[in-house]
Image: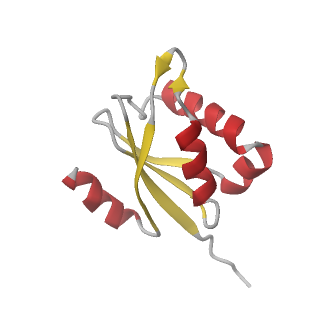
């Protein structure tokens, strides 16, 4: 029996412009997420950057059931490296398509 992986996608907007397509920015965010979520929850969530643009918004994929933990951890992150930053969750969805439509409207 083959099981299909169930994922949720989260559209996130940072308070200041950050280029998530840069590997250093994504690595710094992952470290902060692991710190606030805890190692076990972070591994269960398995966050993965789907789309990151220099314009602002980005999409993170997580395992179904752990999207609330991701959103909570993002609300606690106040800085990445030396820069202060905050993250706003715009929308959570089961498909990327609806998030792309919502992201273009912003």
Residue at 64 percent across and 60 percent down: it is 66
Q: Foreground residue, 105 or 52? A: 105
Please indicate whether residue 23 sits to the left or right of residue 64 in the image.
Answer: left
The residue sitting at the top extreme is 82
Image quadrant in which you'd find residue 30: top right
Please indicate whether residue 38 sits to the left or right of residue 59 in the image.
Answer: right
In this view, 79 is above or below 15: above
Report how many numbered discs are placed on residues in the image: 0
The residue sitting at the bottom extreme is 1
* Spot occupied by residue 8 in the image (x, y as percentages of width and height): 52, 64
Please indicate whether residue 59 sits to the left or right of residue 47 in the image.
Answer: left
In this view, 37 is above or below 78: below
* Spot occupied by residue 32 in the image (x, y as percentages of width and height): 63, 33
Image quadrant in which you'd find residue 21: top left
Q: Foreground residue, 43 or 2? A: 43
Image quadrant in which you'd find residue 31: top right
Q: Quadrant of the N terminus?
A: bottom right
* Spot occupied by residue 47 in the image (x, y as percentages of width and height): 60, 49
Residue at 65 percent across and 52 percent down: it is 46
């Amino acid at each position: 029996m083959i099981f299909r992986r169930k994922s949720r996608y989260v559209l996130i907007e940072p308070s200041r412009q950050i280029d998530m397509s840069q590997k250093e920015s994504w690595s710094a965010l992952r470290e902060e997420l692991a710190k606030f979520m805890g190692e076990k929850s972070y591994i269960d969530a398995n966050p993965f950057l789907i789309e990151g643009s220099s314009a602002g918004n980005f999409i993170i994929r997580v395992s179904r059931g752990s999207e609330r933990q991701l959103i909570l951890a993002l609300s606690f992150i106040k800085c990445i490296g030396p820069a202060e930053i905050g993250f706003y969750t715009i929308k959570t969805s089961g498909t990327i398509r609806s998030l792309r439509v919502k992201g273009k409207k912003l």
